[in-house]
Image (cartoon, grey):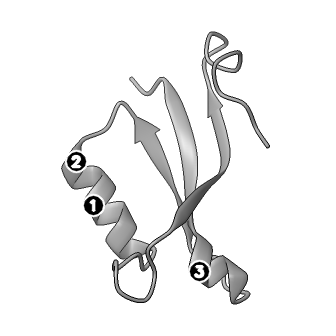
Amino acid sequence: MAFIEAYVTNLGKYNEGELASEPLKFPTTTEEVQALLKRIGVDNIQYEEIFIADYAGTQRLPGRIRKH
């Protein structure tokens, strides 16, 4: 069961006008995170940074995670 779903976005591509973003469900594994980063083009060479574009989850979490 997913407690939260976050939309992870490649910041470099976003700044270039391309939207490379995918949802990531938590809890997750290192392997799932690495696979998502590869799919959105975060290669730690040309693209290194991400941001959380949005999230959705249980009622308990919004007080701990803030949108800016």
Q: Earlier in the sequence, mark 3 or mark 2?
A: 3
Q: Residue at x 44, y 40 (%)?
A: 25
> Furthest-right residue in view?
68
In the image: residue 17, left or right of residue 27: right
Give the distance between the C-alpha atoms of the residues marked 3 and 1, in whole angstroms: 17 Å
Identify the secondary structure beneath mark 2: helix
> Furthest-left residue in view?
31
Q: Measured along the vertical axis of the image, is residue 6 above or below residue 48? A: above
Q: Position of residue 2 (x, y in %)?
A: 43, 28
- Mark 1 lies on residue: 34
* Labels 2 and 1 touching (C-beta < 8 A): yes
Q: Position of residue 30 (x, y in %)?
A: 22, 47
Residue nearest the observer in this picture, 34 or 56? 34
* Labels 3 and 1 touching (C-beta < 8 A): no
The amino acid at mark 2 is: Thr
Give the distance between the C-alpha atoms of the residues marked 3 and 2, in whole angstroms: 22 Å
Q: Which quarter of the figure has residue 10?
A: bottom right
- Mark 2 lies on residue: 30
Q: Residue at x 60, y 72 (%)?
A: 11
Q: Earlier in the sequence, mark 3 or mark 1?
A: 3
The amino acid at mark 3 is: Gly
Q: Nearer the viewer, mark 3 or mark 1?
A: 3
- Mark 3 lies on residue: 12
Q: Nearer the viewer, mark 3 or mark 2?
A: 3
Q: Position of residue 22 (x, y in %)?
A: 52, 61
The C terminus: image quadrant: top right
Q: Which quarter of the figure has residue 66?
A: top right
Badge 1: residue crowd in 10 Å (few <14, some 14–19, many ≥20): few
The N terminus: image quadrant: top left
Badge 3: residue crowd in 10 Å (few <14, some 14–19, many ≥20): some
The amino acid at mark 1 is: Gln
In the image: residue 40, left or right of residue 30: right
